[in-house]
């Protein structure tokens, strides 16, 4: 995680935690999730007796509201990206979102006193990969020395194989 992202995430958690009064009337199972510059307040979460402070079990129906993923038979899916999940990540109508974050390499910051979780950027969805899926144009010589551009094959499926001797 980059220093700038870490400071932004921890600052948001600190600011939100400070906004909650010490004796607030929220129930022990409520939680706040910070993700992608928006805040989602959850009124029902499941507390894991094995890891009550760090694990966040959210309702499966709340998952799309939190991070845009939806649980399907093939796994947790967002647009046309599906990530297989373990059966241990689901329990009744709940999903362990912190275990999912660890699996996909997403950073998580937890303030267990105010029950606030902040999730960083998902590495596989970083950049414009999900938006365009268009590879940058490049040129390589063919066997006769003529330049072949990737853009010559737009609209067609292309397999690019690379090799290096080092």
Image (tube, rainbow, N blue to C red):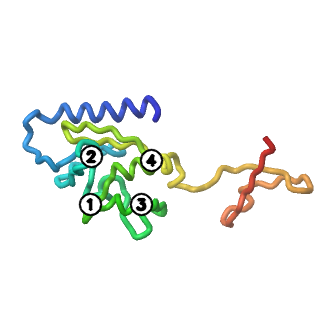
Give the spatial CA distance, label 2 vs label 1: 15 Å
Q: Earlier in the sequence, mark 3 or mark 4?
A: 3
Residue at figure coordinates x 36%, y 45% from the top left: 36
* Residue 91 x/y as whole percent: 28, 62
Residue at figure coordinates x 50%, y 50% from the top left: 124
* Residue 148 x/y as whole percent: 81, 55
* Residue 147 x/y as whole percent: 84, 52
Q: Which residue position holds label 4?
A: 122
- Asked if disc 1 and disc 4 are in contact, CB closer than 8 Å, the reply is no
> Can you tell which mark lies on residue 153?
none
Q: Which quadrant does the C terminus fall into?
A: top right
> Can you tell which mark lies on residue 51?
2
Toward the viewer: 150 or 99? 99
- Asked if disc 4 and disc 2 are in contact, CB closer than 8 Å, the reply is no
**In this rendering, the label closer to the viewer, 2 or 1:** 2
Q: Earlier in the sequence, mark 3 or mark 1?
A: 3
Q: Earlier in the sequence, mark 3 or mark 2?
A: 2
């Amino acid at each position: 995680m980059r220093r700038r992202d870490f400071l932004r995430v921890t600052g948001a958690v600190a600011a939100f935690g400070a906004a909650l009064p010490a004796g607030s009337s929220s129930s022990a199972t409520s939680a706040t999730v910070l993700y992608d510059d928006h805040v989602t307040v959850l009124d029902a979460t499941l507390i894991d007796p094995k890891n009550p402070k760090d694990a966040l079990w959210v309702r499966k129906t709340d998952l799309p509201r939190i991070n845009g993923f939806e649980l399907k038979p093939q796994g947790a899916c967002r647009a046309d990206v599906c990530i297989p999940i373990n059966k241990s990540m689901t329990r009744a109508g709940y999903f362990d979102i912190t275990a999912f974050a660890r699996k996909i390499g997403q950073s998580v910051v937890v303030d267990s006193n105010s029950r606030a979780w902040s999730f960083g950027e998902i590495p596989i969805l970083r950049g414009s990969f999900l938006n365009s899926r268009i590879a940058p144009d490049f040129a390589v010589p063919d066997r006769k020395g003529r330049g072949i551009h990737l853009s010559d094959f737009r609209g067609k499926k292309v397999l690019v194989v690379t090799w290096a001797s080092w």
